[in-house]
Image (cartoon, grey):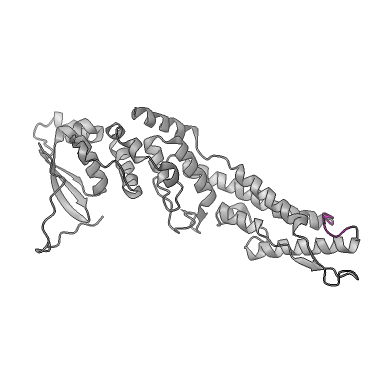
Amino acid sequence: MASDMGPSDSSTPPIQNPFVFDGGDISIRVTYHNKLVVGKVCSQALIRASPVWKKFLNPPWAKEDSTVEVKEIDCSEDNGEALLILFEIAHLNFRAVPRGIYYDVLFQLAILIDEYQCIQLVSLWVEHWMVNEKAESIVRGQEGWLFIAWVFGRENIFEGVSKLLVYTVKVIEKGEFWTLDENTPIPELMTNGLVESIRDKRLNIIERLLKIPYDIIDRYEVKPYKGCSVSQASPFEKKTCDTITYGSITLGLQRAGLWPRRQPKDVLLSVEALAKEIKDVKIFETSMPTATFPKLVLSHHDCIGRNIRLAVWGILVGLKSPVLHSHRTHMAAQKEALL
């Protein structure tokens, strides 16, 4: 975040610096509301709060060189709002700690807690911050809940968001995962092995989805399918059904960019979008006039279309979790640390 050191508007009263704490003996540089702020924090409060801050304030080489003294910490790359919450807790200013936090700040707070290894510091507030986690974690554009769940040990949320990503991420030509609605890359702070696991699960589902229409086409190319459910016993009508169904499926796939046949690795669509393209393939109607019904129109959609929809649904509801055992072990440890 860029610092703004320009002159202040003299007509606007100066904002009190929230990063000046009682007993402050170390200078701190922070970016807060797009401005570089220099505050004062208590070194002992930071040492008690985080092993990372403790090591920074008491570096190993200081034991050998007594002249080494840390006078300033530069946290200007950290999110100022999230950092202020941690400092308020570390300095025991509990009344200043918000009981509710918006997603953006909670995501940044999770990043800092992970970076500074201070999960125990926030144990009294986590349940308040997570009160709407089930609803908030499935909001499109808030995929950072995956990392929030990772840091705060929320295994059920982690599982749900991971499955949602398998279902919704698309791939751009460079091979990067992008969110479906926001057209932005998914958060870079992905946990060990999860990206690969999501990719594997996504490719597996895409392969199974493609197999549905491709297997149907294979049956027609080998021999007439004879699956018509509306044309009685007339061989001519059954052939008509075969022709209409075969043509409808191949043309529908062609319009979706799935025909000629595509390999799963070449499909850039999300699982969600691919399933819709296959499920919505329209089987066209035929006109079969008779003496009794001169304008009779027969729909052959249920001859094969219903089977397609059911097969797609069966694959989607059976989506396997990409969460690995190592992820569950980590979150169990995080949850334990909050007790």
- 280 part of magenta stretch: no
Residue 6 x/y as whole percent: 14, 62
Residue 58 visible in rendering: no
- Quick one: 288 or 251, which is closer to the camera? 288
Residue 191 x/y as whole percent: 42, 41
Q: Quadrant of the N terminus?
A: bottom left
Q: Residue 338's quadrant in the figure?
A: top left
Which secondary structure is most common in the magenta stretch?
loop
Residue visible at 21% across and 30% down in the picture:
48
Query: In the rendered view, does 131 fall on the left or right side of 83?
Result: right
Residue visible at 45% across and 40% down in the picture:
157
Vertical position of residue 211 compared to residue 290: above or below:
above
Q: Residue 128's quadrant in the figure?
A: top left
- Quick one: 324 or 131, which is closer to the camera? 131
> Total marks drawn?
0
Vertical position of residue 49 compared to residue 297: above or below:
above
Judged from this view, the residue extending furthest toward the bottom is 294
Query: In the rendered view, does 228 fall on the left or right side of 133?
Result: right
Residue 88 x/y as whole percent: 20, 39
- 228 part of magenta stretch: yes
Q: Which region of the structure is painted magenta?
A: 224-232
Residue visible at 66% across and 64% down in the picture:
254
Query: In the rendered view, does 208 fall on the left or right side of 75?
Result: right
Q: Residue 83's quadrant in the figure?
A: top left
Residue 209 visible in rendering: yes
Vertical position of residue 43 compared to residue 100: above or below:
above
Query: In the rendered view, does 247 fall on the left or right side of 128?
Result: right
Residue 107 x/y as whole percent: 34, 46
Q: Quadrant of the C terminus?
A: top left
